[in-house]
Amino acid sequence: MSQNKIIPSLWFNTEFGNISKVLDYYNQIFENDFESGQIMPLGQTPSGNTEMCQVKIFGQTYSLMSTEKTHHLFNDALAFTINCDDQREIDKYWNYFIKEGKEVQCGWCIDKFGLRWQVIPKNMGELMSKPKAWEVMMKQKKIVIEEYQVN
């Protein structure tokens, strides 16, 4: 599926190690920008039933693995940023990820699998150059572009 020399790998934990739950979840939000390869069943491992699959999200290849038993949890040391075109796109991703996940601050949220996302407008640098932008951002969980325009 990929010609990439380096492919980021993400290790999930799902009931019965079923990777299709992960694939379905991300396919729902990324739709046409999501492509999955063939599921590779690895069988019983020390972490229980294990399955792998390569996917492409916005053309970037990732290797996903899901195990039945929790092995390593995601944490703040790994996060993905989604650069959005407008508030509607921010709302789309934000609302989807927090539906079964949680809000954090400054455009950060955690999805139902514990993966961290920063959902921001692609012109965030420009917005942050406005007066009092830092104060605006520190009051926000979801980024609301209009609040930066008031400055």
Image (cartoon, grey):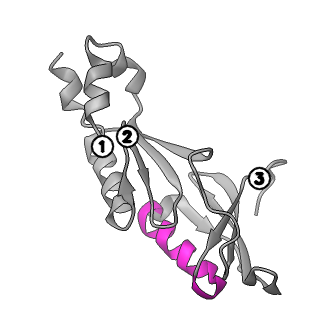
| Residue at 70%, 70% in the rendered image | 71
How many badges with numbers are in the image? 3
Answer above or below: position of 60 versus 18: above
Nearer-N-terminus badge (1/3): 3
10 Å crowding of disc 2: few (<14), some (14-19), many (20+): many
Q: Which of marks 1 and 2 is nearer the N terminus?
A: 2
Secondary structure at badge 3 equals loop
**Image position, residue 90 (x, y; %):** 33, 45
In the rendered structure, which amino acid carries the disc numbered 3?
A: Ile
The type of residue carrying mark 2 is Gly
Query: Does residue 144 lie above or below 115 as drawn?
Result: above
Looking at the picture, tell me which residue is in the foreground, 14 or 69. Answer: 69
Is 94 in front, or is 113? 113
Please give the range of residues in magenta.
Answer: 15-30
Please tell me whether mark 3 or mark 2 is closer to you in this view: 2
Contact between labelled residues 3 and 1, with CB atoms less than 8 Å apart: no
Q: Label 3, on which residue?
A: 7
Apparent side of residue 78 relative to residue 81 in the rendered image (left or right): right
From this viewpoint, which residue is outermost toward the left?
A: 150
Q: Mark 1 points at which residue?
A: 142
Which residue has dot 2 on it? 107
Task: State how far apart marks 1 and 3 are (Cα).
Answer: 29 Å
Question: Mostly what secondary structure, the magenta segment?
Answer: helix
Disc 3 and disc 2: Cα gap in Å?
Answer: 26 Å
